């Protein structure tokens, strides 16, 4: 979705402000937010792509001013409610220490001894059925698409001509997994663009940028278009 | 907060002044309390997660990888070919469903990593990301004005140095291998690791002998 998370190329946020000797956490609640977020994810009611999509659906005005741990907590509230783990009253009602809900069937509660295994759980790399369509060196164009669901193709990188730099393996297609359409694997490619292709002729000619693109984001481009031109095809 | 719980969650999307999140400490405490009371979350697991990222997993892991790569050309070659395995060989597991890839700075090329869509970051070698890495300021500008971002970090690269921006949009996580600083001949692997800043492994810094970059 064209949500508030997709900020690549936006302007007006001001300079980046690195903090000297930054602590791992700035507030006690941030530690708890990390802990309950990872523990709740282990319940098995949602996957990481559904989490990301929950964050993306936070209202843009709220998202852009929230700290990242606040985004996680707002997203966690959405996920707990939508997956029937907690009710609206559980989440925002007066705390009454209600007994465990019988409607929420808990698959796994993360225990101390499982933390290392949880943190080390392997990649979502799964074998693809078909060989990769694209090869290193191929010229490709990213699709012009504006899905209402989750996607990992940023707005700035749509309808842009680039080059396949590396075939990175096949992974569960995030766009599908975020919306419960199953665990379909796709090949992932590192696609390199010139900054001028992405941002126009005034861009710094010494800059290139890359994304990691799922195969279905890409089409063959028969010829490179001239920089700044719209004359391809 | 009185009365705010009568609002339905989907309505929050249309309310720019949602006060349920005005006090995050209270919100998180309430959430943790209800999750714990229902047996869905184990406080001991939370403590273990916090302890892991406060004390055990952080940029020192990545610095050890960089120092080994500087000391051992065979290791550097392995890192370039299969970073996931080369990093795991030092005891740092592949975490959070990610594949690692190491990208090497050269005299002609500087690499910088960003996640414009969220906050993807190589937790296993760098720990939790700093606040600035997750900020809209960094995520928005790293792809369109990387030189300007580097200047925010006090790093001015020659105009002839090519810059490559890596937007981690899928399951790959990137570790920048900075250039070994001049004057570090004869340093032990441990001494080299002590030079390597977190920012140099994201690409917003370089490594120097006096560590003035961080």
Image: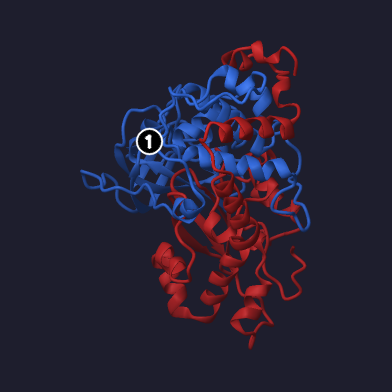
For the view shown, which residue lies furthest in the left direction?
A130
- On the image, numbered disc 1 is attached to which residue? A217
Could you tell me residue A106's position as x and y percent? 42, 33
Residue at (52%, 24%) from the top-left corner?
Answer: A86
Please give the chain letter of the residue carrying mark 1.
A
Residue toward you, B206 or B156: B206
Which one is nearer the viewer's eye here, A5 or A225? Answer: A5
Pick whichever, B155 or A49, lies toward us.
A49
**How many marks do you count on the picture?**
1
User: Residue at position x 22%, y 47% from top?
Assistant: A131
What quarter of the picture does the C terminus of chain A occupy?
top left
Name the outermost residue toward the bottom. Answer: B186
Q: Colour of chain B?
A: red
The colour scheme is: by chain
State the image coordinates of residue B17 (x, y, percent, origin top left): 73, 18
In the drawing, does residue A224 fall left or right of residue B68? left
Against A230, is B205 above or below? below
Residue A28 is left or right of residue B98, and the answer is right
* Quarter of image, res A78: top right
Query: Residue at left 51%, top 35%?
Result: B40
Q: Secondary structure at mark 1?
A: helix
Residue A13's place in the image compared with B114, above or below, is above
């Amino acid at each position: 979705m064209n949500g508030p998370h997709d900020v690549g190329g936006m302007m007006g946020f001001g300079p980046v402000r690195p903090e000297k000797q930054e602590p791992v956490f700035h507030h006690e609640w941030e530690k708890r937010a990390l802990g309950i977020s990872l523990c709740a994810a282990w319940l098995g009611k949602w996957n990481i792509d559904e989490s990301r999509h929950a964050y993306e659906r936070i209202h843009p005005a709220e998202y852009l001013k929230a700290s990242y741990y606040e985004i996680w907590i707002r997203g966690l509230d959405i996920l707990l409610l939508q997956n029937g783990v907690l009710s609206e009253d559980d989440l925002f009602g007066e705390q009454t220490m209600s007994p465990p809900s019988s409607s929420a069937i808990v698959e796994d509660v993360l225990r101390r001894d499982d933390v290392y295994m949880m943190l080390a759980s392997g990649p979502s790399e799964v074998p693809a059925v078909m060989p990769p369509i694209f090869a290193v060196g191929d010229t490709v164009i990213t699709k012009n698409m504006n899905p209402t669901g989750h996607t990992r193709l940023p707005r700035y990188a749509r309808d842009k001509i680039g080059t396949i730099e590396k075939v990175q393996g096949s992974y569960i297609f995030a766009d599908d997994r975020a919306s419960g359409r199953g665990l379909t694997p796709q090949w992932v490619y590192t696609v390199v663009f010139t900054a001028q292709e992405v941002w126009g002729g005034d861009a710094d000619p010494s800059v290139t940028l890359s994304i990691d693109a799922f195969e279905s984001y890409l089409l063959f481009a028969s010829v490179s278009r001239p920089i700044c031109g719209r004359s391809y095809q | 907060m009185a009365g705010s719980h009568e609002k339905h969650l989907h309505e929050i999307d249309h309310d720019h002044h949602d006060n349920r999140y005005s006090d995050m400490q209270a919100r998180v405490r309430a959430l943790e309390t209800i999750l714990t009371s229902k047996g869905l979350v184990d406080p001991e697991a939370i403590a273990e997660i916090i302890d892991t990222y406060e004390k055990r997993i952080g940029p020192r892991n990545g610095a050890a990888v960089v120092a080994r790569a500087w000391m051992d050309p065979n290791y550097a070659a392995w890192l370039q070919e299969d970073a996931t395995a080369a990093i795991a060989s030092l005891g740092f597991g592949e975490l959070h469903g990610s594949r690692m890839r190491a990208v090497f700075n050269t005299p002609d090329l500087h690499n910088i990593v960003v996640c414009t869509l969220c906050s993807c970051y190589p937790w296993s070698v760098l720990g939790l990301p700093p606040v600035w890495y997750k900020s809209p300021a960094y995520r928005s500008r790293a792809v369109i004005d990387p030189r300007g971002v580097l200047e925010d970090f006090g790093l001015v690269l020659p105009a002839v140095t090519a810059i490559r921006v890596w937007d981690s949009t899928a399951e790959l996580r990137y570790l920048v291998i900075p250039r070994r600083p001049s004057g570090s001949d004869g340093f032990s692997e441990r001494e080299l690791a002590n030079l390597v800043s977190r920012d140099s492994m994201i690409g917003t810094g370089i490594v120097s002998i006096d560590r003035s970059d961080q």
